[in-house]
Image (cartoon, grey):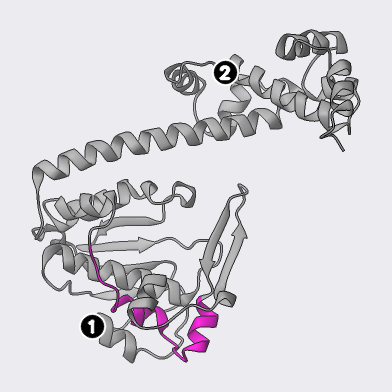
Amino acid sequence: MIEALGQAGHTIPAAALRDSVDCHGHVESWVDWESIAKQLSSPVLGLELSGSIRLRAFNQLTYLAMSSPTLGHSLRRLVRYQGLINPRLGRLLDLQVRDRQAIVSFAEVPWHRSAHEIDFALGILHRLCGWLTGTHLVLQTVQLMHESTAGTEAYKARWGCTPQFGQSLNALVFAAEELGRKSLHAEPELCRSVEAAAQRQLAAMHHCDLLTRLRQEIRKHLAKGASLDVVARALGVSRRTLQRRLSAAATSFHCVVDEERMRWSIEQVVGLQLSIPEIADRCGFANTSGFYRAFKRWTGETPAHYRARGQQSPSAS
Protein backbone atom coordinates (compact mmCIF):
# COMPACT_ATOMS: atom_id res chain seq x y z
CA MET A 1 0.00 0.00 0.00
CA ILE A 2 2.85 2.39 0.86
CA GLU A 3 4.49 1.59 -2.48
CA ALA A 4 1.21 2.12 -4.34
CA LEU A 5 0.74 5.54 -2.75
CA GLY A 6 4.27 6.48 -3.73
CA GLN A 7 3.74 5.37 -7.33
CA ALA A 8 0.55 7.44 -7.40
CA GLY A 9 2.48 10.49 -6.17
CA HIS A 10 1.09 10.52 -2.62
CA THR A 11 2.90 10.47 0.71
CA ILE A 12 1.76 8.97 3.99
CA PRO A 13 1.64 11.42 6.91
CA ALA A 14 3.23 10.19 10.13
CA ALA A 15 -0.17 10.43 11.85
CA ALA A 16 -1.49 7.72 9.52
CA LEU A 17 1.08 5.13 10.67
CA ARG A 18 0.04 2.94 13.57
CA ASP A 19 1.52 0.23 15.78
CA SER A 20 -0.49 -2.39 17.59
CA VAL A 21 0.32 -5.44 19.67
CA ASP A 22 -1.29 -8.76 18.81
CA CYS A 23 -2.29 -11.54 21.21
CA HIS A 24 1.26 -12.96 21.17
CA GLY A 25 2.89 -9.65 22.05
CA HIS A 26 4.19 -8.99 18.55
CA VAL A 27 4.20 -5.38 17.37
CA GLU A 28 2.43 -4.90 14.05
CA SER A 29 2.92 -1.72 12.02
CA TRP A 30 0.04 -0.73 9.80
CA VAL A 31 -1.48 2.14 7.89
CA ASP A 32 -4.65 3.98 8.87
CA TRP A 33 -6.47 3.67 5.54
CA GLU A 34 -9.44 5.69 6.71
CA SER A 35 -7.42 8.80 7.55
CA ILE A 36 -5.54 8.64 4.23
CA ALA A 37 -8.75 8.14 2.25
CA LYS A 38 -10.24 11.14 4.01
CA GLN A 39 -7.14 13.24 3.34
CA LEU A 40 -7.20 12.31 -0.37
CA SER A 41 -11.00 12.60 -0.59
CA SER A 42 -11.20 9.11 -2.06
CA PRO A 43 -14.13 6.89 -0.99
CA VAL A 44 -12.63 3.93 -2.91
CA LEU A 45 -8.92 4.45 -2.18
CA GLY A 46 -8.01 0.76 -1.98
CA LEU A 47 -9.72 0.02 -5.27
CA GLU A 48 -7.94 2.89 -7.01
CA LEU A 49 -4.50 2.03 -5.65
CA SER A 50 -4.82 -1.64 -6.62
CA GLY A 51 -4.76 -0.52 -10.23
CA SER A 52 -1.67 1.67 -9.94
CA ILE A 53 0.89 -0.62 -8.30
CA ARG A 54 3.42 -2.30 -10.61
CA LEU A 55 3.26 -6.09 -10.42
CA ARG A 56 6.51 -8.04 -10.39
CA ALA A 57 8.09 -11.13 -8.86
CA PHE A 58 9.74 -9.91 -5.67
CA ASN A 59 9.80 -12.84 -3.24
CA GLN A 60 9.84 -16.62 -3.04
CA LEU A 61 6.05 -16.89 -3.08
CA THR A 62 5.54 -14.83 -6.23
CA TYR A 63 8.32 -16.69 -8.06
CA LEU A 64 6.59 -19.94 -7.10
CA ALA A 65 3.24 -18.74 -8.41
CA MET A 66 4.79 -17.31 -11.58
CA SER A 67 6.64 -20.52 -12.50
CA SER A 68 3.62 -22.82 -11.95
CA PRO A 69 2.05 -24.39 -15.07
CA THR A 70 -1.51 -23.05 -14.73
CA LEU A 71 -3.49 -20.42 -12.84
CA GLY A 72 -4.98 -23.15 -10.63
CA HIS A 73 -1.55 -24.46 -9.67
CA SER A 74 -0.39 -20.89 -8.95
CA LEU A 75 -3.33 -20.11 -6.66
CA ARG A 76 -3.07 -23.42 -4.82
CA ARG A 77 0.61 -22.80 -4.16
CA LEU A 78 -0.17 -19.29 -2.91
CA VAL A 79 -2.63 -20.84 -0.46
CA ARG A 80 -0.27 -23.65 0.58
CA TYR A 81 2.76 -21.43 1.22
CA GLN A 82 1.15 -18.20 2.38
CA GLY A 83 2.72 -18.72 5.81
CA LEU A 84 6.04 -17.64 4.27
CA ILE A 85 4.78 -14.05 4.23
CA ASN A 86 3.68 -13.80 7.87
CA PRO A 87 3.14 -17.03 9.84
CA ARG A 88 1.39 -15.15 12.66
CA LEU A 89 -1.55 -14.24 10.43
CA GLY A 90 -2.56 -17.84 9.89
CA ARG A 91 -4.55 -18.98 6.85
CA LEU A 92 -5.96 -15.82 5.25
CA LEU A 93 -6.12 -16.87 1.58
CA ASP A 94 -8.24 -19.81 0.47
CA LEU A 95 -9.36 -21.41 -2.80
CA GLN A 96 -12.50 -23.48 -3.18
CA VAL A 97 -14.23 -24.92 -6.25
CA ARG A 98 -17.95 -25.67 -6.15
CA ASP A 99 -20.82 -25.56 -8.62
CA ARG A 100 -18.37 -24.87 -11.45
CA GLN A 101 -17.19 -21.72 -9.71
CA ALA A 102 -13.74 -20.92 -8.33
CA ILE A 103 -13.88 -18.85 -5.14
CA VAL A 104 -10.66 -17.19 -4.01
CA SER A 105 -11.28 -15.61 -0.61
CA PHE A 106 -9.58 -13.57 2.07
CA ALA A 107 -10.52 -14.25 5.68
CA GLU A 108 -11.40 -11.29 7.86
CA VAL A 109 -8.52 -10.36 10.15
CA PRO A 110 -9.68 -9.26 13.63
CA TRP A 111 -7.58 -6.12 13.76
CA HIS A 112 -7.12 -2.93 11.71
CA ARG A 113 -8.70 -4.15 8.46
CA SER A 114 -10.74 -1.50 6.65
CA ALA A 115 -12.90 -1.68 3.54
CA HIS A 116 -10.12 0.10 1.63
CA GLU A 117 -7.57 -2.55 2.61
CA ILE A 118 -9.84 -5.41 1.56
CA ASP A 119 -10.59 -3.71 -1.77
CA PHE A 120 -6.85 -3.23 -2.31
CA ALA A 121 -6.04 -6.89 -1.54
CA LEU A 122 -8.75 -8.25 -3.85
CA GLY A 123 -7.82 -5.79 -6.57
CA ILE A 124 -4.16 -6.85 -6.45
CA LEU A 125 -5.16 -10.52 -6.46
CA HIS A 126 -7.35 -9.99 -9.53
CA ARG A 127 -4.54 -8.23 -11.38
CA LEU A 128 -2.07 -10.92 -10.30
CA CYS A 129 -4.23 -13.62 -11.91
CA GLY A 130 -4.16 -11.69 -15.17
CA TRP A 131 -0.43 -11.06 -14.91
CA LEU A 132 0.29 -14.75 -14.39
CA THR A 133 -1.64 -15.86 -17.48
CA GLY A 134 -1.21 -12.81 -19.70
CA THR A 135 -5.00 -12.57 -20.08
CA HIS A 136 -7.75 -10.66 -18.30
CA LEU A 137 -9.57 -12.78 -15.71
CA VAL A 138 -13.33 -12.34 -16.18
CA LEU A 139 -15.07 -12.23 -12.81
CA GLN A 140 -18.63 -13.42 -12.26
CA THR A 141 -18.89 -11.42 -9.05
CA VAL A 142 -16.91 -10.09 -6.12
CA GLN A 143 -18.16 -10.73 -2.59
CA LEU A 144 -17.35 -8.12 0.07
CA MET A 145 -18.00 -8.26 3.79
CA HIS A 146 -18.17 -4.49 4.09
CA GLU A 147 -21.03 -2.30 2.95
CA SER A 148 -20.77 0.00 -0.06
CA THR A 149 -18.89 3.23 0.56
CA ALA A 150 -19.51 4.85 -2.83
CA GLY A 151 -22.10 2.91 -4.80
CA THR A 152 -21.13 0.27 -7.36
CA GLU A 153 -19.96 2.17 -10.45
CA ALA A 154 -16.28 2.40 -9.44
CA TYR A 155 -16.25 -1.33 -8.64
CA LYS A 156 -17.93 -2.26 -11.93
CA ALA A 157 -15.41 -0.14 -13.83
CA ARG A 158 -12.48 -1.86 -12.12
CA TRP A 159 -13.72 -5.44 -11.92
CA GLY A 160 -16.24 -5.62 -14.76
CA CYS A 161 -19.03 -6.91 -12.52
CA THR A 162 -21.39 -5.73 -9.82
CA PRO A 163 -20.03 -6.63 -6.36
CA GLN A 164 -22.15 -8.12 -3.59
CA PHE A 165 -21.78 -6.19 -0.33
CA GLY A 166 -22.42 -7.39 3.21
CA GLN A 167 -21.40 -10.97 2.45
CA SER A 168 -19.90 -13.59 4.78
CA LEU A 169 -16.46 -13.44 3.12
CA ASN A 170 -14.28 -11.34 0.82
CA ALA A 171 -13.83 -13.22 -2.44
CA LEU A 172 -13.27 -13.18 -6.17
CA VAL A 173 -15.69 -15.53 -7.96
CA PHE A 174 -15.06 -16.75 -11.50
CA ALA A 175 -15.65 -19.78 -13.73
CA ALA A 176 -13.72 -22.82 -12.49
CA GLU A 177 -12.52 -23.55 -16.03
CA GLU A 178 -10.33 -20.42 -15.78
CA LEU A 179 -8.08 -22.32 -13.36
CA GLY A 180 -6.82 -24.31 -16.34
CA ARG A 181 -5.38 -21.24 -18.09
CA LYS A 182 -1.70 -21.71 -18.92
CA SER A 183 0.82 -19.60 -17.06
CA LEU A 184 2.67 -17.08 -19.18
CA HIS A 185 5.84 -17.58 -17.13
CA ALA A 186 5.75 -21.36 -16.49
CA GLU A 187 9.20 -22.82 -15.73
CA PRO A 188 8.98 -26.43 -14.45
CA GLU A 189 12.58 -26.63 -13.23
CA LEU A 190 12.39 -23.28 -11.45
CA CYS A 191 9.04 -24.23 -9.93
CA ARG A 192 10.42 -27.49 -8.49
CA SER A 193 13.49 -25.75 -7.12
CA VAL A 194 11.58 -22.87 -5.51
CA GLU A 195 8.93 -25.19 -4.09
CA ALA A 196 11.54 -27.44 -2.49
CA ALA A 197 13.09 -24.38 -0.83
CA ALA A 198 9.64 -23.15 0.24
CA GLN A 199 8.85 -26.52 1.84
CA ARG A 200 12.10 -26.46 3.82
CA GLN A 201 11.57 -22.87 4.94
CA LEU A 202 7.95 -23.45 5.95
CA ALA A 203 8.88 -26.58 7.90
CA ALA A 204 11.60 -24.65 9.74
CA MET A 205 9.16 -21.82 10.54
CA HIS A 206 6.55 -24.26 11.83
CA HIS A 207 9.19 -25.96 13.96
CA CYS A 208 10.32 -22.66 15.51
CA ASP A 209 6.72 -21.64 16.09
CA LEU A 210 5.97 -24.95 17.80
CA LEU A 211 8.93 -24.58 20.16
CA THR A 212 7.88 -21.03 21.04
CA ARG A 213 4.32 -22.11 21.77
CA LEU A 214 5.60 -25.15 23.67
CA ARG A 215 7.63 -22.95 26.02
CA GLN A 216 4.64 -20.65 26.55
CA GLU A 217 2.36 -23.58 27.43
CA ILE A 218 4.94 -25.13 29.75
CA ARG A 219 5.17 -21.87 31.70
CA LYS A 220 1.40 -21.78 32.06
CA HIS A 221 1.39 -25.28 33.55
CA LEU A 222 4.58 -25.26 35.65
CA ALA A 223 2.73 -25.16 38.97
CA LYS A 224 0.80 -28.32 38.08
CA GLY A 225 3.79 -30.17 36.71
CA ALA A 226 3.48 -29.38 32.96
CA SER A 227 2.70 -32.93 31.85
CA LEU A 228 3.33 -34.02 28.27
CA ASP A 229 -0.31 -34.97 27.67
CA VAL A 230 -1.70 -31.65 28.94
CA VAL A 231 0.76 -29.51 26.97
CA ALA A 232 0.37 -31.55 23.76
CA ARG A 233 -3.40 -31.16 23.99
CA ALA A 234 -3.03 -27.40 24.46
CA LEU A 235 -0.84 -27.27 21.33
CA GLY A 236 -3.33 -29.28 19.29
CA VAL A 237 -0.93 -32.14 18.53
CA SER A 238 -0.70 -35.72 19.71
CA ARG A 239 1.72 -36.83 22.40
CA ARG A 240 3.66 -38.90 19.87
CA THR A 241 3.86 -36.04 17.33
CA LEU A 242 5.23 -33.65 19.94
CA GLN A 243 7.83 -36.18 21.06
CA ARG A 244 8.86 -36.86 17.46
CA ARG A 245 9.30 -33.14 16.67
CA LEU A 246 11.32 -32.56 19.81
CA SER A 247 13.50 -35.56 19.02
CA ALA A 248 14.14 -34.11 15.55
CA ALA A 249 15.34 -30.95 17.31
CA ALA A 250 17.76 -33.02 19.42
CA THR A 251 15.87 -32.36 22.65
CA SER A 252 13.04 -33.82 24.72
CA PHE A 253 9.98 -32.65 26.60
CA HIS A 254 11.74 -33.22 29.92
CA CYS A 255 14.69 -31.06 28.82
CA VAL A 256 12.46 -28.19 27.65
CA VAL A 257 10.49 -28.28 30.92
CA ASP A 258 13.74 -28.21 32.88
CA GLU A 259 14.97 -25.25 30.82
CA GLU A 260 11.77 -23.29 31.38
CA ARG A 261 11.80 -24.07 35.11
CA MET A 262 15.37 -22.80 35.26
CA ARG A 263 14.64 -19.61 33.29
CA TRP A 264 11.48 -18.78 35.21
CA SER A 265 13.09 -19.56 38.56
CA ILE A 266 16.09 -17.31 37.90
CA GLU A 267 13.78 -14.50 36.76
CA GLN A 268 11.76 -14.77 39.97
CA VAL A 269 14.74 -15.13 42.29
CA VAL A 270 16.29 -12.00 40.83
CA GLY A 271 12.93 -10.21 40.72
CA LEU A 272 12.52 -10.29 44.55
CA GLN A 273 8.72 -10.31 44.35
CA LEU A 274 8.20 -13.90 45.51
CA SER A 275 9.68 -15.80 48.43
CA ILE A 276 11.82 -18.85 47.72
CA PRO A 277 9.07 -21.29 48.90
CA GLU A 278 6.55 -19.50 46.65
CA ILE A 279 8.85 -19.83 43.64
CA ALA A 280 9.39 -23.52 44.38
CA ASP A 281 5.64 -24.11 44.61
CA ARG A 282 4.85 -22.25 41.37
CA CYS A 283 7.57 -24.19 39.57
CA GLY A 284 5.85 -27.44 40.46
CA PHE A 285 8.30 -28.71 43.10
CA ALA A 286 6.84 -30.84 45.86
CA ASN A 287 9.03 -29.15 48.45
CA THR A 288 11.60 -26.38 48.86
CA SER A 289 14.53 -28.77 49.29
CA GLY A 290 13.90 -30.24 45.83
CA PHE A 291 13.87 -26.73 44.37
CA TYR A 292 17.15 -25.87 46.16
CA ARG A 293 18.84 -28.96 44.65
CA ALA A 294 17.58 -28.14 41.14
CA PHE A 295 18.58 -24.48 41.41
CA LYS A 296 22.09 -25.40 42.55
CA ARG A 297 22.35 -27.81 39.62
CA TRP A 298 21.33 -25.00 37.25
CA THR A 299 23.48 -22.19 38.64
CA GLY A 300 25.99 -23.68 41.04
CA GLU A 301 24.47 -21.59 43.86
CA THR A 302 21.54 -21.78 46.22
CA PRO A 303 18.54 -19.50 45.48
CA ALA A 304 19.23 -17.46 48.63
CA HIS A 305 22.88 -16.86 47.71
CA TYR A 306 21.97 -16.06 44.09
CA ARG A 307 19.39 -13.51 45.27
CA ALA A 308 21.75 -11.95 47.80
CA ARG A 309 24.51 -11.63 45.21
CA GLY A 310 22.05 -10.01 42.82
CA GLN A 311 21.08 -7.45 45.44
CA GLN A 312 24.76 -6.57 45.97
CA SER A 313 25.36 -6.06 42.24
CA PRO A 314 25.85 -2.42 41.16
CA SER A 315 23.35 -2.96 38.36
CA ALA A 316 20.63 -4.06 40.80
CA SER A 317 18.22 -1.31 41.70
Residue for badge 2: 253
Say which residue appears at 47% left-offset and 52% top-offset.
89
Q: Is residue 235 left or right of residue 9?
A: right
> Is label 2 in a helix, a strand or a loop?
helix
Q: Nearer the viewer, residue 273 or 256?
A: 273
Secondary structure beneath dot 1 equals: loop
What residue range appears in magenta?
33-56
Give the label, 2 or 1, closer to the camera: 2
Label 2 Cα neighbours within 10 Å, binned few <14 / some 14-19 / many ≥20: many
Residue 230, percent from left and from top: 63, 25
Query: Is 125 a magenta residue?
Result: no
Residue 311 vs 7, above or below: the answer is above
**Is residue 43 part of the magenta span, yes or no?**
yes
Q: Position of residue 53 (x, y in %)?
A: 29, 74
Res 16 → quadrant: bottom right
Residue 290 placement, left or right of 126: right
Amino acid type for the residue under numbered disc 2: Phe
Residue visible at 22% across and 69% down in the picture:
174
How many marks the image carries: the answer is 2
User: Would you name the residue on which mark 1 appears?
Assistant: 160
Residue type at numbered disc 1: Gly
The residue positioned 11% from the left and 68% from the top of the image is 134
Choose the circle earlier in sequence order: 2 or 1. Answer: 1
Q: Residue 219 location, x and y as percent?
A: 69, 30
Q: Nearer the viewer, residue 159 or 19?
A: 19
Name the side, left or right, on which 143 lies relative to 290: left
